[in-house]
Image: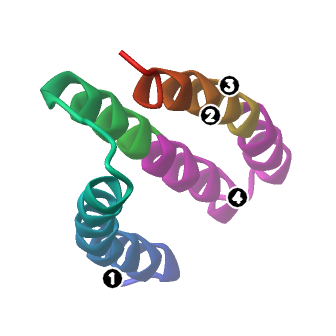
Amino acid sequence: MITRFVIFAFFIGLLTFPVIASAVIWTRDKGIRMNWWKWTLVAVWYFLLLFFILLDFTFIGEGELAAGWKGLLFQLLIMIILGVGLSRIIFAKR
């Protein structure tokens, strides 16, 4: 059975390739030096973001509204902290 969540997850999956391609083009245009471990950190952060979004909306779809919204807010805070740390690593002048 195809539900709205499956369609949502499908479109998120479809958007992953343009996000990756745009990130590569953007870093080249800005002259940001990226090596393999920086790309690995970016990929881990991005897939963690996708996991958290899909997890929380699964909770909301299953009727656990409080758990979904609380998880979304808590995980948003975690992702902001990790994103700031990741940006400091990427933009470090070394």
Residue at 68 percent of width and 25 percent of height? 81
| Disc nearer the start of the sequence (3/4) | 4
Label of residue 60 in the image = 4
Amino acid type, callout 3: Ile
Which stretch appears magenta? Answer: 49-74
Q: Residue furthest left?
A: 36
Quick one: label 2, few (<14), some, or many (20+) residues within 10 Å?
Answer: some
Residue 72 vs residue 16: left or right?
right
Q: Which residue has dot 2 on it?
A: 79
Tell me how far mark 2 sits from mark 4, CA to CA: 19 Å
Residue at 50 percent of width and 55 percent of height? 54
Identify which residue, 36 or 70, lies in the foreground: 36
Residue 79 vs residue 10: left or right?
right
Mark 2 in CB contact with mark 3 (< 8 angstroms) = yes
Tell me how far mark 4 sits from mark 1, CA to CA: 18 Å
Q: Which residue has dot 3 on it?
A: 81
Q: Which residue has dot 1 on it?
A: 1
Q: Is 35 colored magenta in this rendering? A: no
Q: Nearer the viewer, mark 3 or mark 4?
A: 3
Residue at 17 percent of width and 30 percent of height? 35
